[in-house]
Image (cartoon, rainbow, N blue to C red):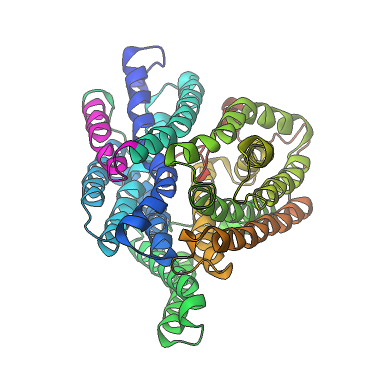
Amino acid sequence: MAGDAIAFASRTGRLVVAATVLGSAMASIDATVVSIALPSIGREFHVGAGSLQWVSNAYTLTLAGLLLLGGSLGDRFGRRRIFEIGTMWFALSSLLCAVAPDAPLLIATRALQGMGAALLVPGSLAILEASFRPADRARAIGSWSGLSGVATAVGPLIGGWLISTASWRLIFFINLPVAAAVLLLSQRHVPETRDPGATGRIDGAGAVLVTVGLAGLCYGLTEGPRAGWDSAGVTTTLVTGIAGLGLFIVVERRVAAPLLPLGLLSSRQFSGANAVTFAVYGGLGGALFLLPIQLEGSLRYTPMEAGLSLLPVTLIMLLLSARSGALAARIGPRLQMTGGPLAVGAGLALMSRIHPGSTYPGTVLPAVVVLGLGLAATVAPLTASVLAAAPSDRSSVASAVNNDVARIAGLVAVAVLPSAAGMTGAVYLEPLHLTSAFRHALLVAAATCVPGAAIALLTIRNQTAEEPLGPAQAAEEPCLHCGLDAPTLSGSVRR
């Protein structure tokens, strides 16, 4: 559609950006807002920490398992069409979440939400890349990144206010008018695009196997500390999970159009950068699941105050991420990717000091600021390193794989950390026991960042002047933003 490519300065261009920002923000904000709502959900349904883990992980599980498939479907059947289907699916499942009468049904509907997000999220940036003129593409994606950052900052505040003043159910109801706006803008202004090179059969078997594998591992790791590692249910699900992931690798080696091109993993830098991602986002994901519970349970913060407490992280990311990317382009990414994870770990270690009676300026704010500085140092160079390690025609797939690794890391962390730290049953309702479990969990989360720094030091190489940091779009699009749940995709899932 080269002749019909959109100009960024046009009214249509601005409305296309608005549609994609609203759609992707709706899905990403949901993950952070639900974490703030978990204590309220637990009290209303009278459930333990295990159920709260699944309220969070059910969403991440289906999103992570089906994310690459969602991008492939968009390339094949139309990016706007799949984006709109995902938006409608997300809205309907949000309605079901809002009216769920108990925890099991809420968990089930959260899994449905993740499926909708898996269709919605990949299409957001893919639409921008395919629709705008090449000269305007960087500006469109830069605007998307900045506006998504603002939405990420404002979302938890609005969600916390809704929970504090009315009910946690409103954080799901509010998705309905947003989704309606996305669909209206998309129908009227977003052009339809496809990838003419996307041929052959869809890798449905790969999508099923990776989802089954992740589900088995997630269930086994969550239930193991409570039910016993030798119990039949835990053993069966762990074996099923490992087998599913093993078969996924076998299938990906054989299919013509795999969801995960295994050739990418032969690059030491690509594998190393994704290992750093797993380590850092594993610690981060576990910590951000537990922090609102600790703030609301031990420090008696309201949900809105808990949402406000993390605002400095987003502000620091917005202010420094582009500068961090530019610095890495000049000096190479190794220094920041080594020091950044250590700073993230230091921030998480400082968070472990939060206890009943802690003040925000004296204890919470310093930890949040150090965490934000560590993420600002890490995320942009990490994204650029992933892209630099992949051929230019695979940069979109490489970015999507990195995004998925971050989500899987958070999934595993939320499954393992609370139970391993002793946060079982209704411990989250008892401030002293909660604080002890929180402290142990945060120290473990901090420790996971140290291997990430070591891996970066050993595997990430600084590019020379003759070897630019990444493909063309990495140089053109310095505005890299991290939503708190995962790194922003710098490209579509498949082109």
Residue 47 x %, y %:
36, 64
Q: At 76% from the left edge and 55% from the top edge, which residue is drawn?
A: 454
- Residue 195 seen from this side: no
Residue 189 x %, y %:
26, 23
- Asked if residue 92 lies left or right of residue 147, the reply is left
With respect to residue 175, does 434 lie above or below? below
Q: Is residue 173 magenta?
A: yes
Residue 429 x %, y %:
46, 59
With respect to residue 389, does 243 lie above or below? below
With respect to residue 4, does 358 lie above or below? below
Q: Is residue 149 magenta?
A: no
Residue farthest front in this picture: 357
Front position in the image: 2 or 409:
409
Q: At 47% from the left edge and 19% from the top edge, which residue is drawn?
A: 136
Q: At 38% from the left edge and 24% from the top edge, which residue is drawn?
A: 17
Magenta segment, which residues?
A: 165-187
Q: In which quadrant of the rendered image does the N terminus lie?
A: top left
Q: At 28% from the left edge and 40% from the top edge, which residue is drawn?
A: 170
- Asked if residue 226 lies left or right of residue 369, the reply is left
Front position in the image: 251 or 56:
56
Front position in the image: 403 or 313:
313
- Residue 316 seen from this side: yes
Majority SS type along the magenta span: helix
Front position in the image: 171 or 181:
171
How many marks can you see? 0
- Asked if residue 427 lies left or right of residue 372, the reply is left
Q: In which quadrant of the rendered image does the C terminus lie?
A: top left
Find residue 466 and report its image quarter. top right
Residue 476 x %, y %:
58, 25
